[in-house]
Every structure is written in C-alpha cells, then in structure tokens.
Amino acid sequence: MRDNQAQATPAALQADTAAVPTDQMIALIGAGPSGLAGARNLQKLGIPFQGFEAYSDVGGLWNIANPRSTVYESAHLISSKRTTEFTEFPMPEGTADYPSHRELCRYFSDFADHFDLRRHFRFNTRVLRVEPVNDQPESPWRVTVQNPDGSQDSAVYKGVVIANGTLAEPNMPAFEGRFDGQLLHTSAYKHAEQFKGQRVLIVGAGNSGCDIAVDAVHYAASVDISVRRGYYFVPKYVFGKPADTLGGKKPLPPWLKQKVDSVVLKWFTGDPTRFGFPKPEYKMYESHPVVNSLILHHLGHGDIRVRPDIARFDGHTVHFKDGTQQDYDMVLAATGYKLHYPFIDHAHLNWQGMAPRLHLNIFAPRWRRLAVLGMIEASGIGWQGRYEQAELVARFFKGLDGATPAAQRFEAAIQGPPPDMSGGFKYLKLERMAYYVHKDTYRAALRNAAAALA
C-alpha cells in the first residue's frame, strides 16, 4: 500500500530550511504523534519550521526507550488501528487490530521517514522557555533550549506550536498517613515482574489501571483494585469485530445512544456491580469508558478484588473508607496525568481552572501564532483527529502570512465565545475530562474551519 503512495510533497518544499532565518520559522515542540502531524502539515504548505525533541528519536510516549515514555511492556492501543491511524499513511496490512507499542513505534518511525521529517528536528534538545518578545498579538517568540552538550541557546521564532503530549507528567494524589511498602505511579511501571510475590493494590480503574491489574494477576501474590466511582466497561470485540468499528453511519441523539449502547453493553459485559464496582452515578459516555474485557474475566475468577476508596495508610496497612483494611507490599497509583507545559507561562495559554481555554482546544486567544496540538481527549478521536488539528493550524498560519480574508474571519472567531464541542453529553467535571470533546462534533468543526481557510 505504501509503495504506491505518493509523497504529495513538491520538491520545492523539500529544500533545506537552514538558510531561512529563525524569525521566519515556526518552532514546533515535540516529535510524538501530534508533533509529527504538525511537522507534516507545516511541510505540506511550505511553512518553514524548526522542530525540537528532548529524546533522540520520534514516537513520543510510544517509544518505550524514551525516558519520558509512560508505556509498559504489555501496552496496546485501546482503539483499533483503522480508527486511530493517519488517513494519509495507513498502518500496513498484517498490523494487529490493537497494535502494541512496538508496532506503533515502528509506525511513527516509518511515517517520519516516508515524509522526510526527521531532518526538521533537533533531537536531544529540551525546550526550557517560550516567551513572547513583546505584548502585541503579532509578537514573535523567544525559544530557549538546552542542547545535547548541556549548553543553552535561544532564538526568536515567528510562532510556536506546542505538541509535547498530555500523558507524561504523573498526577500523584496525596494520601493520608505513611505507606512503608513501594508507593508508585503507573508511569514507573514497565513490566509485570515488578509484581512478583507482592501483595498489590492498584488505585484507579481507568484503562491503564485495568490493563496493569490484568498483568499483575500472573505474578503478584494478590491483586486488589481501589475505586471511588463506577465505570462502564467496553469489550474490544463485539460480534467478532473491533467494537469501535461498529455503529450506524447516522449518529444517534446523545440520549438515545446512551440508552441503546448501555443495553448492548450489558449483553456483552453484564453488570459490573456484581463484582463490587459502584454503580456509575453518571450516564454512559459522560466519562471515558474502560476498553477492557479481561478485567471482568479475572474479577469473575477471583483473581482481582474490588476495594473502596482509600482512607489512609499506616505502615503496610491500607485503611479503606468502608472501615475495612488490608496489608500490601505495593500500592500503584493509576491516577492519570497532568497537562504539563512547564516552559511557558500559563497566562499565555489562557489557563482557566484545570486546563487552558483555547479555541477548538488549539488556539490561544491572546496571540496570533501560538497553538497547541494534542490537548484533546475523546472516545475514538485517533491520530487523524490530531492530524486535522495540525492541518487547521497550518492553513491558519498560511492565511495569516497572506493576510487573507478567511484568516481574518477565523482570527475573529478565536476571540469570540468558544463553540460547544460536547455533542450534547454532560461530561464529568474531572481534571482528565477538562479538555474532553465529542469526537464527531469536534472533527466536523475542525474540517469546516480548515475548509474555510483552504
């Protein structure tokens, strides 16, 4: 498939950008999936850019060799390959329905090679500071970096695209008391042998927590999972096909989809409350579902026990809020990640409450050429959703360069009230849901905006 695929990149756009002064370039931070999408779309429109990546290669968190990677040996996609891949660069035939991190790392490496993107990046180069040169919306940006040899330098760029990901900075809760065993975040988990002979408590039953609990069953002396709320569990396969590939072409109203899918889900997974999970106090799709069938299998076999929320630690003893207690050797917090843009002042990103308030989760209203890629979470959004973000950014920046009426209209929209991207769903008011959107509503908005700028 790929051998016959056109590069779709004019030779003129492949010219070395070394001769372009930095103040005519965009600084692009990160070479993971969102960063590569940004690089490809800037490249397609001939917009000069300089990429920065703290690690020595592409792939972001999917490159397990990257010290900032938070994937573990058993990690696979929770969405299927065809709903996740870049449309422009399909995953090769023979790729598993739910690829492993190894397959995905190769995929991103191949993507970078196919479109000759690596040469645009300075690897082993960490961005330390990003700051506007002046207080005007059109301000260029000073970017200060740490080079591979430890030295620092800075340069002024025309604009900045931040694409360093959302799943690298652990969100570690504060627990009352002291735990005398190992207290870790899932970001420190790499392989199941870490559990060998341990009495393990996993805190949180999101997708990573459930994956890791299933891993632990085969090595640990015991495995418990502590939860504070109920969850909806979605199997990876329905009627023998990846669950996210099913569904009618005409979307249902939110209330009807919630009702229908809840009924269908019970046919395949039953009622998780019979295993000790609390009944969800919210409707389906108002929080990210757990895509895992094996967790219910092991709960049904007694390999994993559900525990309530933690009250406090006392040595090796964990006291739970229902008055029960149990001794453990390891507590692993599967409590997610924080948005982490340490190199830029939060005010520049219009940070409000738990997350930046950006137009379409991308554009900072105060600045003309400051954009964020990948600050998006949605069920089934895939990397193509990030690619469409990058396409919109590139078209807008190109329109600004040409002072087009379409770019001026879009700039006015950025300053206006934010569009509703919820799709009619009432998402939980949680930190990890602060930048959650409805996939179809959001992607339609991206495509419409990009088409208007074409």
Image (tube, rainbow, N blue to C red):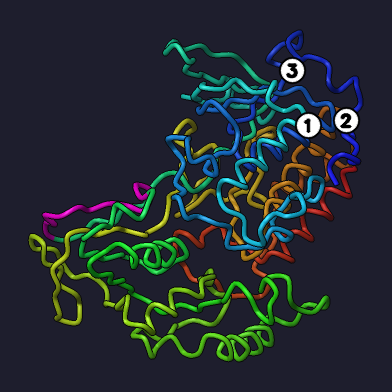
Q: With respect to residue 46, does 61 lie above or below? A: below
- Dot 2: few (<14), some (14–19), or many (≥20) neighbours within 10 Å? some
Q: Identify the residue at horizontal 19%, vertical 75% (top origin).
A: 320
In the orientation shown, which residue stands out farthest toward the top? 19
Compute the Cα span from label 2 to label 1.
8 Å
Q: Which residues are magenta?
A: 177-189
Q: Identify the residue at horizontal 38%, vertical 90% (top origin).
A: 274
Residue 24's tag is 3
Q: Identify the residue at horizontal 72%, vertical 28% (top origin).
A: 117
Can see residue 61?
yes
Mark closer to the observer (3, 2): 2
Residue 9's tag is 2
Q: Amino acid at mark 3?
A: Gln
Front-most of residues 35 and 118: 118
Q: Amino acid at mark 2?
A: Thr
Q: With respect to residue 193, does 271 lie above or below? A: below
Q: With respect to residue 428, does 107 lie above or below? A: above
- Dot 1: few (<14), some (14–19), or many (≥20) neighbours within 10 Å? some
Compute the Cα span from label 3 to label 1.
22 Å
Q: Amino acid at mark 1?
A: Phe
Describe residue 181's horizontal placement relative to residue 407 as left or right. left
Describe residue 161's horizontal placement relative to residue 8 as left or right. left
Can see residue 365?
no
